Image (cartoon, rainbow, N blue to C red):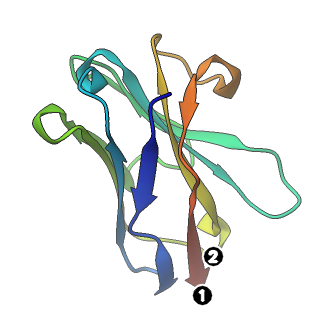
Amino acid sequence: QVPLVESGGGLVQAGGSLRLSCAASYSTFSSYVVGWFRQAPGKEREFVAAISWSGGTNYADSAKGRFTISRDNAKNTGYLQMNSLKPEDTAVYYCALSTIFVVDATRYDYWGQGTQVTVSS
């Protein structure tokens, strides 16, 4: 098991920013792809962004230009900087680790408990 702990969620007004963190208590963090997903009430979990071991990134269309994914392997931590937030970004955000660079949530092996992001209009 690779425990993951997300933090940084909260309540923000539309147009505001939040920075989510995903801390892994495992020394091989650098060998994993870090993915961020979100799930809004009544909706399926959806891909937001992913970053590979070498720093390559992939974003959902809804995140492009507004969200930035990054990682600090020395700190075993991944980040999701979210700017220009919209009410439709409201969801529980999860980080996850995978051994392959994919958007399919079923291919991610380890998951955090999630952090709530609420964007008010």
Instruction: Say whether residue 58 is visible.
Output: no
Q: Is residue 40 above or below residue 38?
A: below
Which secondary structure, mark 2? helix
Q: Position of residue 106 (x, y in %)?
A: 70, 22
Which secondary structure, mark 1? strand
Instruction: Say whether residue 85 is visible.
Output: yes
- Residue closest to the far top: 100
- Residue closest to the far front: 1
Q: Image check: 25 left or right of 40?
A: left
Instruction: Give, as a three-letter code, the residue at label 2.
Output: Pro
Could you tell me how far apart the alpha carbons at marks 1 and 2 are, in whole angstroms?
Answer: 6 Å
Q: Nearer the viewer, residue 32 or 86?
A: 32
| Residue depicted at 54% across the width and 30% down the height | 110
Q: Nearer the viewer, residue 51 or 3?
A: 3
**Numbered mark located on residue 120 in the image:** 1
Q: Image check: 106 left or right of 121?
A: right
**Residue position for label 2:** 87
Q: Image check: 97 left or right of 42?
A: left
Q: Residues within 10 Å of mark 2 (few under 14, many from 20)?
A: some
Q: Residues within 10 Å of mark 1 (few under 14, many from 20)?
A: some
Q: Position of residue 109 (x, y in %)?
A: 57, 22
Q: Image check: 27 left or right of 9?
A: left
